[in-house]
Image (cartoon, rainbow, N blue to C red):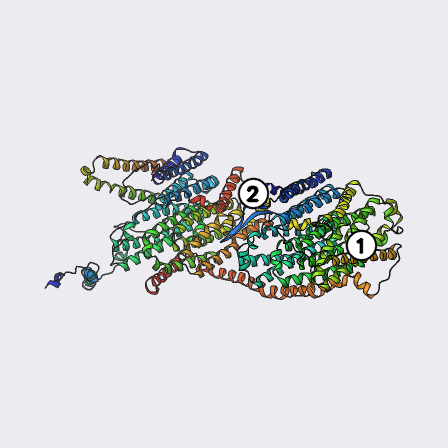
Amino acid sequence: MNWIFLQVKNPITDVSSAGSYLPIAIQLIFAVLFIAAMMGLTHWLGPKRNTADKLENFASGIESHGDARQPMAIKYFLVAILFVLFDVEVIFFYPYAVNFRQLGWEGFFAVLMFVGFFLAGFFYIIKKGALNWED
Amino acid sequence: MSKIVALVPLLPLLGFLINGLLRKQLSKTAAGIIGSGTVLGAFIISVLLFIDVRNGKTGVVEFFPFISFDTVKIPFAFLVDQLTAIYLLIITGVGFLIHVYSTAYMHDEEAPHFARYFAYLNLFVFSMLLLVLGANYVIMFIGWEGVGLCSYLLIGYWFKNPQYNNAAKKAFVMNRIGDLGFLLAVFWLLAKLSTVTYGEVFSADAIKALSQTDITIITLLFFVAATGKSAQIPLYTWLPDAMAGPTPVSALIHAATMVTAGIYLVARTNILFSMAETTQHVIAWIGVATALLAATIAVKQNDIKKVLAYSTVSQLGYMFLALGMGAYTAAVFHVMTHAFFKALLFLGSGSVIHAMGGEQDIRKMGGLAKHMKITYFTFLIGCLAIAGVPMFSGFFSKDAILLSAYEHNKIIWGIALLVAALTTFYMFRLLFLTFKGSFRGTEEQQHHLHESPRAMTIPLIILGVLSIVGGYISVPEVFVAGGDKLGQFLAPIIPLHTHAVSHMEEYALMGGTTLLVAIVIVFAWNKYKTYKEETNGAFGNLLENKWYVDELYNTIIVKPINWLAGFIENVLERSGIDAIVNGVGRAVQYSSRQLRLLQSGQVGSYVLLMIAGMVLLFVLQFFLKK
Amino acid sequence: MNAIIFSAIFGVVMMFSGVFFSSKQLIRNLAIGLMAALLVLNAAELQGYGLFDINLNNMLHFTSFGLVFNCIAFAATFIYLLLSARDIEQVGVNLAEYFALIFFILCGVGIATSFNSLLMLFLAIEIISIPLYILTGSDKRNLKSNEASLKYFLMGAFSTGIMLMGIALIYGATGTFSLDAIATATKGFETLLTGGLLLLLIAMSFKVSAAPFHFWTPDVYDGAPTVFTSFMATIVKAAIFAAFIKLFEKAYLPSVASWKAALTFIIVATLFIGNITAVFQQSVKRMLAYSSIAQAGFMLFALFGYSDFGKEGILLYAAAYSAATIGIFAILLKMSDYTFDGYNGLAKREPVLAFVNTIFLLSLAGIPLTAGFFAKYYMLVAAVKSGASLWLVIFAVLCAAVSVYYYFRVIQAMYFKTATTEDVTTAPVTINFKVILIVLAAIIVLLGLFPHWLFTKVYF
């Protein structure tokens, strides 16, 4: 019964052999089959009653109007990208928080430098007026 | 040997640079002084060197490595020995006199051209000195080419006259043919011996390394070079045309120095030449043939300078005849005496032309002796010397050559004797037609007749004296035991040889020659003391037109080459090479136009092409590799 | 280390200078001053005065070769700024940012010449590339500039993907990013390693615009503001070559024989496409783009015939090519018309410009007495010494002959043609501009006479 649980009697020791990738392949096939099966099932089992309202694009309950492909103010992107930038950089604090004690003063100064550059960037975008919504 | 020897060529070079670069600023006087002064300086140093050499101080002076590759080392070095010392004296001595003479002769030129003339002349002296001073054939070749260039520049000095330019070109082309021989000989030496330094080439080891064929070919090639520079058959035709240049140039370059470079080359290489019997025969026969041919032509020439030019060719033939006999000393001796009397004759003719206001036709002269006593007198000395009248320098040198000819080959001796008679005849014809009888020029010219200024007459007088006493440095043994000072002086370079001719025979030969010369002079006097219009026979016409050699060359060489060049230009060049060259260009243009289309501007197609390239590289790296 | 840290700091300084100063002249002079300082600091490290001693875990390795290369790149940038700083002002309003981006690129250059780990290589290439995408599109109102920027970005991202894939495969095969370890990788994963190296080779070929991965080059060089094209085509390209040769030395050299076929293919394609396509161009700017592809083909010979000789050669080539191309672009910037006809009669209007331009072009064509001649000579000798088949070398020489055609077209236009219309003009140039160009030309001629002068500092 070992094969059911993907247990091999004689484990392959050579990691580069294709055999060691077998479990991954089985997993892949299983995933694809599972999704296909589920989609097929819902399709087959579920009832189908089409109305005009139901065929509308779902937009969180708000009535949609016009074309989505409209020019938008660059400011949205700017704010979005700045948000992502600063948000991602904050991630670096997590590893530091975990290793706070071990890294000691040296680590502290390194992070201080990081924060320094960080603030410089913040200062720069404010000075440049990137966050000014009104012109 | 000290490095001071470098000054000998450097002084004229300095003169050349000053005169050449500042020709627009310099006055005529300054240019003349610089031109003559530098040569005088070179002459003084040459005299000091000569004294050194007489005391046995000879040697090689190395300056810097000139060319070195592989095992071949060619230094920039000068060799000062007996032969060089004599040449140095001739070049700088006669050169100086001619420079002085030129200051007066060229006085009508404008200042920049006057300076240009002296610049060329100085450059010539520099090149000639390099030629004789060089310690190897390559340095000699530099000088060899340099004198060729100067000769070209000076023949075409009056460059506004297209005929003169043609003469200059002719001289240059003829010389180049000879130079090719020189180059090939040097290459041959390099290939066989890996050296071109005299001392090494003439060493016993080197000679052993050369086969008889090598020696014959090398010497023949050198002789080809000599025929170009020294105007021998078949390359002699440029020299008479070279008279287009100013008369002092004819005297210096085309009589006294440059044209004797060929003799220098052969004398310098005498060790090789003595070992090549075939070459010796060729040289002797070509020499004597040239002497005869030129002498016959000279008889019928009416241009005062043309007569002298052919006489020069004839005398050079004489020298080669001597070289062919192995009588190198005699040849060098004749070079020296010839330098004196031929320079004298040319300068004398220059003086005459000067007086006649540019007229060169002797039929329009006559009776000039009354007006120009010094010129006449010195010209007479020159004629006596070249004719070989006893007590004059030509007698001794000609006698030495005739003696060696008599000793080796009676036929050549016979022809040489005939040439001597012809020489006497045309020289005295020239003398009598020019200076005796009545004046046949225009009234205006007659009023104008005058003796030349002192700057011209003094060189004439000095050369006149030299033409007399120059012969006494090599008096035949029969007169004075040990009289052959020149032969003894040159002995380290040219082995002495003794004549196997008894004293009685020698006296008889001299007597015979002298008698012949005397008879011819009397004959010429009778024929030309009064001028008569002459009508030529068929043979006379043939001579007056120089045996039609120029026309012959034109037909068998120039025209076929022109035709071939035309053929190559029209057929090979136009439809062959041009087509290929343009075709390549068009092919590139075409492929450029097509390849350009790959650059469509669509990122999609770019990426597609890149993927294709990647696939190709993968295939190449993983499947096609080896 | 000096170069990397200070160029980054100077970049930040330049960013803030735009915030605090409004005088363009001040910003420009500050940039030039900082550039000179950077050059001095790098030279100081070459002399042994490194200011930092940081434990880098062997990720960076500073060699004299890399430092000399930095010197060449920084000196070239310095001259570039002297010549073209005014033209940078013309591009747009964010003057300080342009300078800042240039400094950031130089930071990337510093890493590219000293990396010892594939991670650092990736970082270097990205630090160089991203500011370039921005600079390419800096002329915001120009559609061509926008298009070029987008194309560059798309294709650059594509090649970055390939590079990362290659690095990943190499990591898979060796378990390390360290270059030293790749060279001594254990057996067993040859296919994986070769595949990774091949992808890396392709990505690097893309960056140096070698065929068949060159397609971005003409469009981007043509579309970018000319003053930035000059920077891209010279300093950046040379720096990536420095990285390439360093990578090659460590990663490819152990199995160099198996790479000859791929390299030969790339070299031949690059030389052929670069040279042949340049022939038909009508715009000098676009011709220079193709010429930069062709020159890259020659520089690839340094990899093909890798040796000390080839390494010296690539230094000389980088210097010669950068100097000449910067000069040509500086003059091109003064022309109102970028076609060949725009150069008509330049010799009459601006004899000095025409003369130095001639020297630059001669150098690019590889005519003796200019640095370009010895640069090409070193490349070919390196190839011959490494046993390149003769036809490859002959092919390269023939391509160089073709290049004479399109380089000389400019000379011909300058000297032998007269301007037909009145509106062909040249912007007025200052005396300083001319003097710097003459100095640049003098450097090229001096390097053409004494190429060894450049190598005295390199003890490999």
**Other-residue count near label 1 (Cα within 10 Å), few / some / many at <14 / 14–19 / ≥20:** many
Q: Quadrant of residue B606?
A: bottom left
In depth, the one of B51 and C425 nearer the eye is B51
Q: Position of residue C294 (x, y in %)?
A: 45, 54
Q: Quadrant of residue B53?
A: top right
Viewed as shown, does residue A49 lie left or right of B456? left
Which residue is found at the position 21% from the left and 38% from the top? A103
Q: Secondary structure at mark 2?
A: helix
Mark 1 vs mark 2, CA separation in Å: 66 Å
Q: Secondary structure at mark 1?
A: helix
Mark 1 falls within which chain? B
**Other-residue count near label 2 (Cα within 10 Å), few / some / many at <14 / 14–19 / ≥20:** some
Query: Residue C420, labelled with which disc?
Result: none
**Where the N terminus of chain C falls, by quadrant?**
top left
In depth, the one of B515 and B94 nearer the eye is B515
Which residue is found at the position 65% from the left and 63% from the top? B565
What type is the residue that disc 2 sits on?
Val
In depth, the one of C65 and B434 nearer the eye is B434
Viewed as shown, does residue C15 lie left or right of C397? left
Viewed as shown, does residue C69 lie left or right of A63? right
Kindly tell me whether residue B120 is visible in this rendering: no
Up the image or down, A107 lies above or below B303; here it is: above
Foreground label between 1 and 2:
1
In depth, the one of B243 and C69 nearer the eye is B243
Query: Residue B427, labelled with which disc?
Result: 1
Query: Residue C352, labelled with which disc?
Result: 2
Which residue is found at the position 50% from the left and 60% from the top? B593
**CB-based contact (under 8 Å), mark 1 and mark 2:** no
Q: Position of residue B176 (x, y in %)?
A: 65, 57
What type is the residue that disc 1 sits on?
Met
- Same subunit, labels 1 and 2: the answer reads no
